[in-house]
Image (cartoon, rainbow, N blue to C red):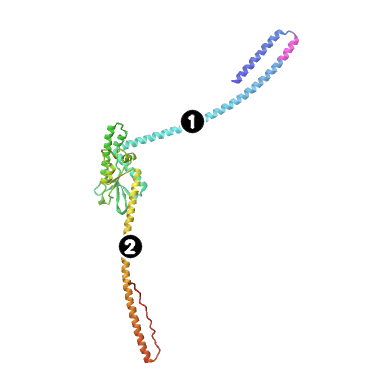
Amino acid sequence: MDQTILLVVVIVGFGAVLFMLNQRLKDLKSSSAVELLKSDVTELSRGINNLQQSVGNKLDQNNMTMQTSMQKQLSESAKLVSDVTQRLAKLDETNRRVVDVADELKTLQNVLQNPKQRGVFGEYYLESVLDNILPSKNYQMQYKFKDGEIVDAVVFLDKGQILSIDSKFSLENYNRMVSEDKKPEREKLLAKVRSDLKNRIDETSKYIRPSEKTMDFAFMFIPSESLYYDLLIGDVGTGSSARDLIEYAFRDKKVIIVSPTSFMAYLQTVLQGLRSLQIEEQAKDIQIRVGQLGQHIGKFDELMGKMGRSLGQTVGHYNDAHKELGKVDKDVVKIAGTSPAVDALLLDKPRIDE
């Protein structure tokens, strides 16, 4: 833009000079004036050529600078377009993954809407937890009792004892209750949730069978932390017209309700308690054996006393016999007139502490 203005100014100035020269030609008639005018025109032409050359150089320099700047801008623009394209490609991949996850969650939701499939999911979740904390030989899924009843899982403890674990849970009414805003409908659904849990507690208690070497309690596994939380401190577990379900489960049915996060802690508590009981039983066994060892030591001491007394009598008989032999030797010496041949060696009797 600046170059165009400069060129226009030069042209206008050149036109003004020609106009002035034309006026002077009209006014001047003498040859000397013409010569002077020619000299001025020559100088003016030379100045215009220099100015034109300077303007051309300036224009070339500006064009080169402009081309360099444009190339730089084009390069940066191309780089920016490439970066945006890559980011859009990554965003498209992320969107596809989000869609895939959403589809998987929808499939999982459809699976969990089926009660039978919910039970399979609960058993799978329980098996995953057991597999993470116990060797495979220490637990069994789908354990069958003598009457054909099947519990979801058992844990094999010391001395052949087993711990029954049931993983059935009811989430349909609970999910409806959580999403319900109207208080009357929520109260009705809350009553259904409590009823569902009570039925599960009663069913779990059927797997407590000491006659088949089960512990005198069982675990009820709920693979839902939100339901377990509500059961502990929310409206599900307690209420003005509802009995505490956890207290009912433990005191009346000997059922301990656990969740994925609390299951390990409860199981470790049971295992540690059994180890402590085993140590206590071993301590009692050691105490009994020490008592038996004391009896054996007493009998041994009695026998040693008898042996000591017997040895004392033997030593006494030995010393008496040696004394008699000495007397015989003295008689022989008197008769034969020889020196004594027997040197009496007497033994000390063993000392026996009474």
Residue at x 68% of width, y 19% of height = 49
- How crowded pointer 2 is (Cα within 10 Å; few <14, some 14-19, many 20+) is rated as few
Question: Can residue 38 be seen from the camera position used here?
Answer: yes
Which labelled disc corresponds to residue 290? 2
Question: Overall secondary structure of the magenta stretch?
Answer: helix
Q: Is 35 inside the magenta-drawn segment? A: yes
Which labelled disc corresponds to residue 84? 1
Where residue 233 appears, x then y in whole percent? 32, 40
The local secondary structure at tag 1 comes to helix
Indicate whether 114 appears above or below 216. Answer: above
Indicate whether 16 appears above or below 226. Answer: above
Where residue 229 appears, x then y in whole percent? 33, 40
Which amino acid is tagged 2? Val
- Observer-nearest of 42 and 268: 268
Quadrant of the image occupied by residue 323:
bottom left
Which amino acid is tagged 1? Val
Asked if disc 1 and disc 2 are in contact, CB closer than 8 Å, the reply is no
- How crowded pointer 1 is (Cα within 10 Å; few <14, some 14-19, many 20+) is rated as few
Look at the image and tell me in which quarter the C terminus lies. Answer: bottom left
Residue extending farthest left = 147
Residue at x 37% of width, y 34% of height = 102
- Observer-nearest of 163 and 248: 248
Residue extending farthest right = 32
Q: Is 253 inside the magenta-drawn segment? A: no
Where residue 151 appears, x then y in whole percent? 28, 46
Question: Can residue 227 be seen from the camera position used here?
Answer: no
The magenta region covers 30-40
Indicate whether 318 appears above or below 331. Answer: above
User: Which numbered mark, 1 or 2, is in the foreground of this view?
Assistant: 2
